[in-house]
Image (cartoon, grey):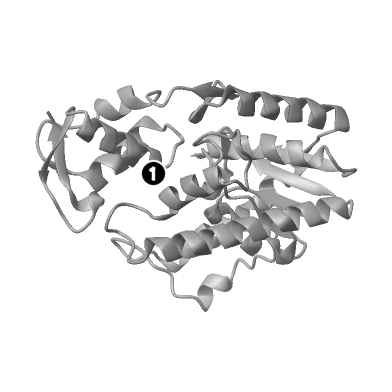
Amino acid sequence: MIEVVFGDSTFGSMKMAKNYKSDAWVTATPAYMGKKPTEAELKKLYDGQALGGKSSDVIGINFTLDIGSLTDGIESDQRKAIIREISSGPVGFIEDPEEAFRSYWVRAIDQLNLLKEKAKQGKSFRIWYSDTPYELCGYYFVCWLLHQYECQVVAIKLPSYIGNEDNTITFYKSWGEVQPGKFYIFANDEKSIPPSLLKINAIYWKELKEEDACLRASINGELKSVPQDFYDHFIKRNIPTVPTRMGKIIGNIMGHECLNITDFWIRKRIRHMISSGDITIVKGGENEYTFHIKKT
């Protein structure tokens, strides 16, 4: 079974999940902020089970398909330009943006080629996705790709929350939030994706490409093309009237609004608002995150 996930974080977590050991923390050096956790707290934190299988059977599709035009295809110069902008990070934050892009792009293409190779071999696939736009886009893209081959496909959609044994609830937005030792919990939730549904999903992906929008959002669990200012209202209402670090503002937006989008798009829209005069840079810094900005 080939596991297909979306995003670097989920890719790394899934690889660890395949052969997870709950006592690995004993020989590791955990990092923490604030008070040092007790041994009992660490045991609870790292409690879990292995998903089973080989880590080499994990494929990560990381093309951030919720952002940018889709008309020219996933391997096009058009998509490369988008990935270059995303992988370069905030202005001044990464020492060598071009090298960061090249490294990201090579990994992304290698993983895509591996997916195609496994599909040609007729392997079985399990797709892990959620209502987060980049994962939902990835799901439809992979369905479009796999419908061209004779493969067995199942999928697991992340629930918005799960109940725990201690009567608490854990909320989730994307698979990147799931700890490696917890993936096994969801294994029984897989649902078959028959050829007929693969074809329907492939048709929908084709329609999204033809709509040629610069942004896609998840609305009530449905993937829709939306205008580039779709999230602007939520961003604007979090811009203070007193100078505040951009990094803190972006963190507040991501934490309070739960928009299920990356910091890249928020940063991009803030740049637009700065150029349009809606936001003022009061004080510069080493990189964009350290800029102090306020509502004009």
Image quadrant occupied by the N terminus: bottom right
Q: Is residue 170 left or right of residue 200?
A: left
From the top left corner, tell me how far across and down residue 119 is, in percent.
83, 50
- Residue at the (17%, 32%) spot, across then down: 279
**In terms of depth relative to the viewer, which is nearer, 178 or 143?**
143
Q: Residue furthest bottom?
A: 27
Image quadrant occupied by the C terminus: top left
- Residue at the (44%, 75%) spot, across then down: 29
**In terms of depth relative to the viewer, which is nearer, 189 or 232?**
232
Q: Image height check: is 275 above or below 40? A: above
Q: Quadrant of residue 95?
A: bottom left
**In terms of depth relative to the viewer, which is nearer, 128 or 33?**
128
Q: What residue type is labelled 1?
A: Phe
Asked whether the viewer can see residue 123, the reply is no
Q: Is residue 59 left or right of residue 68?
A: right
Q: Mark 1 points at which residue?
A: 264
From the top left corner, tell me how far across and down residue 150 is, in percent.
90, 43
**Label 1 environment density (alpha carbons within 10 Å; few <14, some 14–19, many ≥20):** some
- Residue at the (22%, 33%) spot, across then down: 275
- Disc 1 is placed on an element classified as helix
Q: How many labels does the image show?
A: 1
From the top left corner, tell me how far across and down residue 66 is, in percent.
53, 35
Asked whether the viewer can see residue 35, the reply is yes
From the top left corner, tell me how far across and down residue 148 is, in percent.
84, 39
Q: Image height check: is 20 above or below 147? A: below
- Residue at the (59%, 70%) spot, across then down: 23
